[in-house]
Image: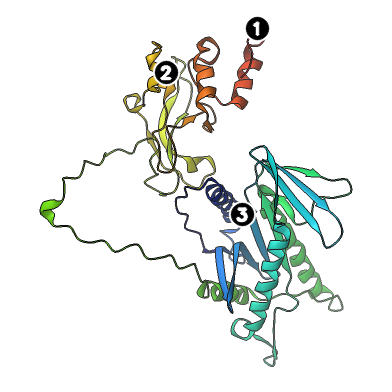
Amino acid sequence: MLIKSKVFEPQSDPRLKAGDEAERQMAFLLDRRFEERDDVFLLHDLRIQKGRHAFQIDHLVITRYGIALIESKSIHSKVSITRHDARREHWSREFRGREEGIPSPVRQVQEQARLLQDYLRENAELILGKLLGLLQKGFGYCPFDTYVGVSTSAVFNLSRGTPLPEHVFKADEVAPEIDRQLKERGSRDTFLKLNPLAEMPWAMSREEALSTARFLLVHNAPRVRAAPPEVVPVPVADVAEAPAVPATPQPGSLCPACGTQALAVAAAGPVRADGGRDRYLACLGNRDGSCTWKIPFEASRVAEAPAKYAAESKPVRPEEAVLPAQPGRAGPRYFCFDCWVAIEKDVARFCWDRKERFGGKAYCRSCQVKFRSRRGAANPSASGA
């Protein structure tokens, strides 16, 4: 059951944008697995104020048999982990061709779990009932499981003798692991009913688990954003007529449904007789299922190729479409015709200059390899980018 979701806002900083994308993906995977269950409660983007300090939790899963905390990390490059001893574990990653140290996300989520357990223990009487109506139940023995969910494209480089930390999982592995742990603890509870002498596991009722989730929701303390500057009213006579707003969304603009992802042109459906497919103006959220907005895309709305490229007396083709510049970005952006990832201008032009190989469309370097494997036998002299 979803108790709290996160509202994502447009980000101009690439790292913040990548972090939001990792959280959105993890939330989608957790919601898909547990949202329909009435004994599992999900909270995303929870911030608790404890004294003078606050702690943030990306994802929280509350069940009858324990509480799981998940820290999302957007890491698409090589990650190096070196364990010196049981107390020291150093992390680093590649960024723009250089290796840089990063805080250990394992220590980070473990500290969040410690703070959350202390906070719930201090407020147990407001959440949990009493055993036999006399003894106050608490969270002292409650299992607090911690997970670090990294991008599925991350590559781990482990030093000799350093195993992958047990708390680290690829993003798509976290929800199945939580589900497995839940089933295992549930089976112990069932066995206890058959064997009263077995060790009693910590557990709370479904109502107490829901009460815990609602208590944390009530005490969520989001950051207070600074108030926008005061707007001085302007006399109507001095206001110039505003330009007309396009009735139809354009590539590169924000999705009118979710308001967070950009719009791009995508091809879908069966291949027609002319070799093409139907085109749609779609939200980039269609890639991970976070948004399903899309409308048919007409060829007349495709932007022309860059002026410099057209000035070289080369024909402008619809496949050379680019997205208009977005706030915070310099110049237009190009996208791979196959997977729709952003590509550089020189990569796109490499494809345009080889129309017989790529059909006049632009592809990223990864997708260009597919054409080499398809047509290598027919044209062995062709070379990749």
Q: Quadrant of the N terminus?
A: bottom right
Which of the marked residues, 3 or 1, is nearer the chain's N terminus?
3
Relative placement, left or right, of 304 versus 94 is left
* Amino acid under disc 1: Ser
Query: Label 1's element?
Result: loop
* Amino acid under disc 2: Tyr
* Amino acid under disc 3: Arg
Instruction: Give the residue at the far right of this rendering.
Output: 161
Q: Residue at x 25, y 42 (%)?
A: 245
Of 5 and 53, the residue lying toward us: 53
Query: What residue would you read off at disc 3?
Result: 33
Query: What residue would you read off at disc 2?
Result: 309
Camera-near label (2 vs 3) is: 2
Give the CA distance from mark 3 to mark 1: 49 Å
Relative placement, left or right, of 288 versus 302 is right
Which of the marked residues, 2 or 3, is nearer the chain's N terminus?
3
Query: What residue would you read off at disc 1?
Result: 381
Residue 60 is situated, as x and y percent measured from the top left of the image, at 62, 64
Residue 42 is situated, as x and y percent measured from the top left of the image, at 58, 63
Residue neighbourhood size for the residue with mark 3, other residues' Cα within 10 Å, grouped as few (<14), some (14–19), many (≥20): some
Residue neighbourhood size for the residue with mark 1, other residues' Cα within 10 Å, grouped as few (<14), some (14–19), many (≥20): few
Camera-near label (1 vs 2) is: 2
Instruction: Give the residue at the far left of this rendering.
Output: 237
Give the CA distance from mark 1 to mark 2: 26 Å
Query: Label 3's element?
Result: helix
Relative placement, left or right, of 292 versus 214 is left
Label 2 near label 1: C-beta < 8 Å? no
Relative placement, left or right, of 180 versus 273 is right
Residue 373 is situated, as x and y percent measured from the top left of the image, at 66, 16
Query: Label 2's element?
Result: helix
Which of the marked residues, 1 or 2, is nearer the chain's N terminus?
2
